Every structure is written in structure tokens, then in C-alpha cells.
Amino acid sequence: MRDTLNQGLIDFLASSPTPFHATASLARRLEQSGYQRLDERDTWHVRPGGRYYVTRNDSSLIAFRLGDDPLREGMRLVGAHTDSPCLRVKPNPELYKQGFMQLGVEVYGGLLMAPWFDRDLSLAGRVTFRQTGMQHSRLIDFKKPIAIIPNLAIHLNREANQGWPINAQNELPPIVAQVPTGERRDFRALLTEQLEKEHGILAESILDFELSFYDVQRAAVIGLDDDFIAGARLDNLLSCYAGLEALLTAEGNETCVLVCTDHEEVGSCSHCGADGPFLEQVLRRVLPEGENFTRTIARSLLISADNAHGVHPNYAEKHDGNHGPKLNAGPVIKINNNQRYATNSETGGFFRHLCLENEIPVQSFVTRSDMACGSTIGPITASQLGIRTVDIGLPTFAMHSIRELAGSQDLTYLVKVLKAFYASHTLP
């Protein structure tokens, strides 16, 4: 099971270089498993026992299996996010310096910049274009390496190993081509060519785009004993994948929901983010109305799954001495009394009990008292919806790097506990 899940994750990461592609990958798997796509613009006709999913902005997705009596049984929700820190292409990106063509980029999210140097980069995202007088959008993925951000040689920067600030405006634009002096290439024309290559579409003009650079190196199981998974976007596509696998394989007839939303890395405040109305609007269309809606929410529980900070052997002092999660030692309950995480004693106790009942190791994380604590969609969703929430995640290294590291056994643990959660007959 471990090897199958890990290979599935590796394939999912490869097919999901952007939140748009991740959502499309999730949708494909759901449709293959009999889930019916709903359109927000249409009238919905859902029924108990039905399986459905809906997307918004092509970058967020909610899938649900509707139980016989959600008012009595409550809902079991798993939440994660589809976005990761990266470099996004600016609207007018063409730069020409010293005979090279570069593309101007904007830093998206809390990016670790240094690891992006000297990597083979490709480009993917969504393109909006005009064809036969109408506006259309398609996803594109160049797939092959088309860009690189070369480091400055140590001979010209003797202080490089002492640490130096990276200027995002000046030092991060990737080089995409070498061009003769005075020559200019139209970036939108390149996108037109890619649309024709991928989709056979002859676009009249490119109207707009949302494109991200990504590392073409595939994720891999590594280590002398295959202990680790290394790859891009583990934060937080790992949790999206685990939630999907659990939803598709869980038994029972309870109402189960998978929520994968965009823009977590920049605060979730968007029409398709966790701090927007997407989840509540979907639930209000499928759950009982009025007072019974509130009663259903009160009987429900959300597991917010986002990666946790594993204790790094070279930086163990960055953790509280009693709360250093280990890789391959199971999921982590994340706690912060200042509500950066939404866990409380009841929801944390429920998750711990769930792990114990299913013989899954479980850990706890509290950040050092002299360090700021990060956050995730848990507190946002809890405050938006009024739902009881526990924040958990798998321990990882190098969070927000271009290549992160997780334990190869932990994915199995996470899928197992989320599957048990979806199949649980009673909630606290």
C-alpha cells in the first residue's frame, strides 16, 4: 500500500504544476470514480447517496458524498489547499539585458527564494484568449525546461556563503532565451503557439494569463532505505491527494466532504479561497435550510490538513523541546492557543482517539514561545462556518522551498486516518 500511494502522489504532483492543474487532476479522478460534476450556474438536483463535485475559478474544488441524514449524523469534512509558493509571470514580462530574454516575475506566497536558482524551470497555468469573437480559457503546460535563474559565481560574490539578501525584482527573472541585439520576441505569441500545440486552438489574441514557473524534476522516493519523498508542492498537494484517496475508498453512508481551495499561501481572501463564501454557498445548496443548517454544522467536524514542521537534525533548536515532530512517525496535531490553529481539546482529543483506534502513531506540535506561529485554513473555515475544527498535518522539511521533503511512510498513515474519519459513525 505504501509504495502504491507514494507512486500515486508522485504522479499527482507531476500532473499538477499549478492550482489549476491540481484541480483538473482531482476532477479527473473523481469522475473516474463516478462523481458527477455540478455547475454553480445551474439548478442542482442532488440526492442521498449521490456523489458530486464542483469547482470555482478552475483552481478550487469541493467534492461530497451525500449521506442519508446529514442533519442527524453531521458531516465529515477534510480541508486542504491547492496553491504553493512560486514565481508568477507579470502581465508585461519581457525583459532584454545583455543579449538575453528574461521574464519578469512576482513572488507568490512566502517563498524560499535561494533554492530556485540553478533549477530547470518550465511554465504552466491558465490562458484566456479570443477565438471567433468569443472569450475562452484553457490550461497550458510547456512541460520541457524553458528557463533558468543562474547563480552568480562565487568568484564574483565572495560573501555568497555568508548569506545575502535576494532582490526579487532584480535577481529572480528567469532567462528564457538568448537573442541577437535589437531582436524582440512577443511572449503572447509564444502562448498562442503553445495553445495550438497542446489543444489545436488557433487563438486570435491572448487576452490575459496566470502562469507560474515550476521545477521539471519529478518527485521521488529517496534515501538508503527509501525513507523519504522529495518533491515540489508537497505543501499542500500531499494533503489534497491524501484527502482524495480517503474519500474515494472510505466505506459507510455518512455525508463526507473534501475541500481543496486556492490562495491559502496569500491569506485565502478570494472568491475561491477559504476566507471566501465558496464552501458555505455549496453547503447551503445541499443541506437542510434555516435552523436545520445550523444544527447540521453543529454536529459536523472539519479536519484541516496542512503540512507541519518536522524537527530538522541540523536545526533542532528551532523547535520546542517537547514538540518536535519526527518524519515517518505519523500525523501531527497542531496547537496554538492564540488561534493560529483551530484545534481545541475536544477536536484534538477526537483525532488522537481516531489514531489510537486505528493503530496510527500521532504527534503534537506547538511552536516555540519566542517564535511567531504560522496558520492555515483551519481557523479561517472555523470562523467562517462555525464548525468544530482540528488542524493536523504530516511533518516535512524545507517547507516553501522548490523541493520539500516528507516521510515515505507518513502518507499511508494520513490516508488511513482520514479514511477512518470519513467512515466514522459518530462524532463528538
Image (cartoon, helix red, strand yellow):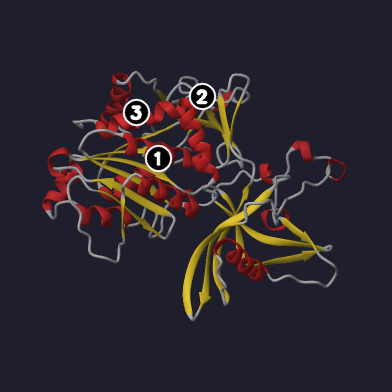
Q: Earlier in the sequence, mark 2 or mark 1?
A: 2
Image quadrant where one finds the C terminus: top left
Residue 425 in the image: state x and y as whole percent: 19, 31
Mark nearer the N terminus (3 vs 2): 2
* Picture layout, residue 131 above or below residue 42: below
Task: Identify the residue at horizontal 77%, vertical 36% (top origin).
Answer: 161
Q: Residue furthest right?
A: 155
Residue 255 vs residue 266, the one in the foreground = 255
The residue beneath circle 3 is 417
Mark yes or no: residue 371 visible.
no
Q: How far apart are marks 3 and 2 (CA)?
A: 17 Å
Query: Is residue 291 visible in this depiction of the protein?
Result: yes
Residue at the bottom extreme?
Answer: 133
- Determine which quarter of the picture holds residue 201: bottom right
Question: In the structure shown, which secondary structural element does the residue marked by tag 3 occupy?
Answer: helix
Q: Badge 1 is on which residue? A: 340
Between residues 168 and 219, which one lies in front from this camera angle? 219
Name the spot of residue 383 as percent of width and height, x first.
Answer: 30, 47
Q: Which amino acid does label 2 sit on?
A: Leu
Name the residue rendered at 36%, 34% in the picture. Answer: 337
Q: Quick one: label 1, few (<14), some, or many (20+) residues within 10 Å?
A: some
Three-letter code for the amino acid on which mark 1 is drawn: Arg
Alpha-carbon span between mark 2 and mark 1:
23 Å
Q: Where is residue 126 in the image (x, y as percent from the top left)?
A: 52, 61
Identify which amino acid the numbered label 3 is placed on: Val
Name the residue carrying label 2: 327
